[in-house]
């Protein structure tokens, strides 16, 4: 996709972080923009921001972990603008911790948003794009955590590996049909966003149980402190919107923004082929 002016973009997770950057880039390119997020106040802030930039924008509060809400997002987008040309399946959350300690509720929340949310977006929007038969693009936000593994982040890694696999598999389908729908999977390393504060974005059914001992544990507190540290010391966010739009223009499938991880990705594949057991010693 190379022409953006007058086209319609839909962005999930548009209340904070990457979603805001994508919305700003859409506004700069004179796109019509549909922004979605579970947090209405954060969504309003993005709406004001890009509307001040001159964008035609509508906000649709959406919990991407519920299919009916994603379906509603798709139908409201069509109702308002008549087409969808660019989709950012971007909302995501994280809870640190080893799988044998992590509350089942947290696993379900992470999978609900990070995996089901992406799958629901593809299911709701691809038929619209196929029917249009015009050049379209979908960007699924995964992470470099979808190409590598580290200790104590099993749920997040699982969700991001699933996003990479889902993107690859669906993209084969688009190619096989000669569809005009192109796809990218965005796999950044750490970037300064509000991801470490995502507990405030929990829907009611995934609220933290105050009596759950895990949240008082040293494992959880250390994991949280680590999450704050890695996000706060990540790269600044300002280059992200431009990098992702350049990748869309160039029809790049994998969007990698942190070259320092590339040797580790290569090593993981090499180790697999050579039968090397993944070692915790890699992490010092
Ligand atoms: N920041 C990083 O270092 C980093 C690195 C790799 C990948 N990512 C991924 O980038 C994506 C965006 O995260 P971010 O870093 O901008 O974090 P962020 O918290 O700043 O923004 C995420 C947005 O998603 C929204 N959201 C959460 N649950 C939702 C739901 N159920 N329905 C709709 N919206 C929901 C939040 O309200 C928030 O506005 C996520 O998928 C995340 O996993 C982030």
Image (cartoon, grey):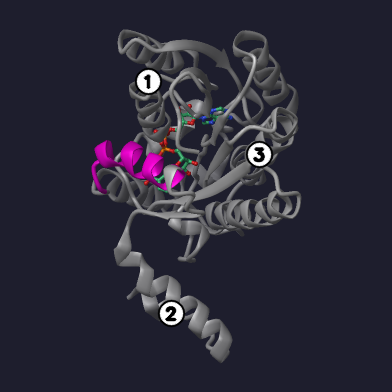
Callout 1: SS: helix
* CA distance separating discs 3 and 2: 31 Å
Q: Is residue 111 magenta?
A: no
Label 1, residues with CA under 10 Å away: few <14, some 14-19, many ≥20 = many
Ligand 1 is within 8 Å of the C-beta of the residue at disc 3? yes
Along the horizontal axis of the image, is 99 left or right of 264? right
**Residue at 25% of width from left, 48% of height from top?**
235
Callout 2: SS: helix
Q: Position of residue 251 (x, y in %)?
A: 49, 49
Q: Is residue 238 magenta?
A: yes
* CA distance separating discs 2 and 1: 39 Å
Q: Are marks 1 and 3 in contact (CB under 8 Å)?
A: no
Front position in the image: 133 or 123: 133
Q: Position of residue 3 (x, y in %)?
A: 45, 31
Q: Residue 26's quadrant in the figure? A: top left
The answer to whether residue 101 shows anywhere in this view is no
Marks 1 and 3, the one that precedes in the sequence: 1
Marks 2 and 1, the one that precedes in the sequence: 1
User: Is residue 37 positioned above or below 198 on the image?
Assistant: above
Mark 2 sits on what residue? 267
Label 2, residues with CA under 10 Å away: few <14, some 14-19, many ≥20 = few
Mark 1 sits on what residue? 27
Mark 3 sits on what residue? 112
User: Which marked residue is nearer to the observer: mark 1 or mark 3?
Assistant: 1
Q: Residue 43's quadrant in the figure? A: top left
Q: Which mark is residue 247?
A: none
């Amino acid at each position: 996709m190379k022409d953006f002016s007058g086209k319609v973009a839909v962005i999930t997770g548009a209340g904070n972080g990457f979603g805001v950057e994508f919305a700003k880039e859409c506004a700069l390119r004179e796109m019509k923009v549909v922004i979605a997020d579970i947090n209405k106040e954060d969504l309003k802030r993005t709406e004001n921001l890009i509307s001040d930039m001159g964008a035609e924008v509508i906000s649709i509060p959406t919990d991407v972990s519920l299919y009916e809400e994603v379906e509603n997002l798709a139908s409201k987008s069509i109702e308002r603008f008549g087409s969808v040309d660019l989709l950012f399946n971007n909302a995501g959350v994280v809870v640190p911790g080893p799988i044998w300690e992590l509350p089942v509720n947290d696993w379900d929340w992470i999978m609900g948003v990070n995996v089901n949310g992406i799958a629901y977006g593809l299911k709701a929007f691809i038929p619209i794009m196929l029917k249009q038969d015009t050049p379209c693009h979908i960007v699924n936000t995964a992470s470099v955590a979808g190409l590598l593994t580290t200790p104590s982040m099993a749920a997040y890694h699982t969700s991001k590996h699933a996003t990479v696999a889902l993107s690859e598999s669906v993209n084969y389908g688009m190619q096989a049909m000669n569809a005009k729908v192109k796809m990218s999977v965005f796999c950044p390393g750490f970037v300064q966003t509000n991801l470490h504060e995502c507990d405030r974005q929990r829907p009611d059914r995934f609220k933290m149980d105050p009596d759950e001992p895990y949240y008082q544990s040293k494992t959880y507190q250390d994991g949280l402190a680590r999450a704050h540290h890695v996000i706060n010391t990540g790269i600044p966010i300002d280059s992200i919107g431009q990098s992702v739009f350049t990748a869309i223009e160039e029809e790049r499938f994998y969007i990698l923004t942190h070259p320092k991880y590339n040797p580790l990705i290569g090593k993981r594949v090499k180790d697999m082929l050579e039968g090397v057991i993944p070692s915790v010693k890699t992490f010092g």
